[in-house]
Image (cartoon, grey):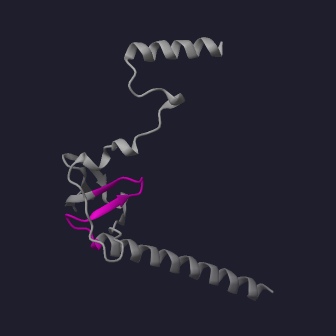
Amino acid sequence: MNILLFVMLGLFVFMMFRRNKKTKEQAATLQSQFAPGVEVMTSFGLFGRIVEIDDAENKVLLELSPGNTATVHRQAVTKIVEPVLAAGEPAVVPNDASSLTIEKSESIAPVNDAPRDETPEETLRRLSDEGKKDS
């Protein structure tokens, strides 16, 4: 019975060291792929592009958006982000905010079916009337 206990303990310790070794190998592989221009994600969910790597201080300078940068610890960068493309479709990324505008046909439905062409005075009157109805 004691022999079985020691065998199980030895197996447990062996598996634990093996898992730690695999984790370190994966981290080393990831760290070796870091280079300026690579899209990455940090452990706290921040996405950016590597601008500069400081090996002496273990820091990475990330460009979050054009003109905005953040300095994070090298170990905080946990994933390399690869763009997902649909089969046969080229990636089209707008360089301006035109994709964020809402077309008239896609506009959001008005709250409480309020008319779209009402003046600010009419809006105030309608909202005050609605407040009186609820009271």
In this orientation, which residue lies closer to the viewer: 115 or 94? Answer: 115
Tell me which segment is drawn in magenta: 32-48
Query: Is residue 15 on the magenta stretch?
Result: no
Who's the residue at 47% across and 37% down the image? 109
Query: Is residue 45 on the magenta stretch?
Result: yes
Q: How many marks?
A: 0
Question: Residue 33 location, x and y as percent?
Answer: 28, 72
Question: Residue 128 location, x and y as percent?
Answer: 52, 12
Who's the residue at 54% across and 28% down the image? 112
Q: Is the residue 50 above or below the residue 27 in the image? A: above
Q: Is residue 100 left or right of residue 122?
A: left
Q: Is residue 46 left or right of residue 113?
A: left
The quadrant of the image that shows the C terminus is: top right
Question: Residue 3 location, x and y as percent?
Answer: 74, 88
Who's the residue at 44% across and 18% down the image? 123
Q: Is the residue 36 above or below the residue 65 in the image? A: below
Question: Residue 40 location, x and y as percent?
Answer: 32, 62
Q: Is residue 87 left or right of residue 18?
A: left
The quadrant of the image that shows the N terminus is: bottom right
Who's the residue at 52% across and 77% down the image? 19
In this orientation, which residue lies closer to the viewer: 39 or 12? Answer: 39
Choose top left, top right, bottom left or bottom right for residue 37.
Answer: bottom left
